[in-house]
Amino acid sequence: MTARQTLLVAMAAALAATSIYLTLAPWIAGDLATLAREVGREEALARQLAATWQVSEGKRRVVAELIAGRVTLRQAAGWFRELDALLDGGPRAGRPSRVASGEEALCRMVYSWAVAELRDRPESSAVLARLAVEYRQQFGHDPQPLPGYAPPLTPAPFPWPPGTPAAGPASPRPRASAAVLGRSSA
């Protein structure tokens, strides 16, 4: 093969490669952009999951304090409001909240968590009777747990992503919420 033929073959190969690149470049760039967006969404969802997990654990601690008689139903509802605010001001900001906000609705939610927590426990009747008296004094009628409501099951602490400590969102009221979440507030 002569030098001229080699040069023509090389130019044809380069032209073919350039054509293939120009044909595939927008598709490849689009896939890379989609991949980058999905990685960002995955990270945001992981942060939201960690924050939700911490709030759920905080609510469990509040309910344990309520069952033990160390806080009142109204105080527990206040803690639930603060914990819910962590999610409303955190990763879910800008989205409408599905969390009850009125005082009676919060007390009803706390009562529902207590009912679920006390299921099949010997002290349930006495604790629920005490909570019902508090609820009745505050709202003038007996409490009704939310229909079919039970807090999510938590088999063990759950760091997310695996192998890292769960980091919740910044709290607008860090001292109060940090105490409920079991973190130091220093």
Image (cartoon, rainbow, N blue to C red):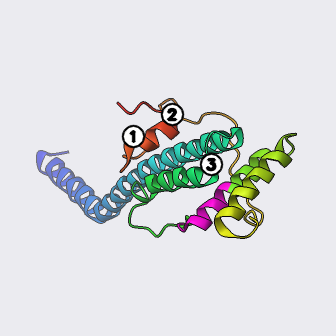
Label 1: how many Cα within 10 Å (few below 14, some 14–19, many 20+): some
Residue at screen point 15% across, 46% down: 2
Q: Secondary structure at mark 1?
A: helix
Q: Secondary structure at mark 3?
A: loop
* Kind of residue at badge 2: Gly
Q: Residue 77: percent from the left, percent from the top? A: 57, 55
Q: Check disc 1 and report the residue beneath it.
A: 175
Q: Residue 75: percent from the left, percent from the top? A: 56, 50
Q: Quadrant of the N terminus?
A: top left
Vertical placement of residue 141 versus 162, above or below? below
Q: Which residues are magenta?
A: 101-110
Q: Residue 135: percent from the left, percent from the top? A: 69, 61
Label placed on residue 72:
3
7 sits left or right of 95 in the view:
left
- Pick whichever, 69 or 183, lies toward us: 69
Cα–Cα span, label 2 and label 3: 19 Å
Q: Earlier in the sequence, mark 2 or mark 3?
A: 3
* Kind of residue at badge 3: Thr
Magenta span contains residue 160: no
78 sits left or right of 6 in the view:
right
Of circles 2 and 1, the one toward us is 1
Q: Check disc 2 and report the residue beneath it.
A: 182
Q: Is residue 160 visible?
A: no
> Which residue of the protein is positioned furthest toward the left in this rendering?
4
Cα–Cα span, label 3 and label 1: 20 Å
Cα–Cα span, label 2 and label 1: 11 Å
Q: Is residue 131 visible?
A: yes
Q: Earlier in the sequence, mark 3 or mark 1?
A: 3
Q: Quadrant of the C terminus?
A: top left
Of circles 2 and 3, the one toward us is 3
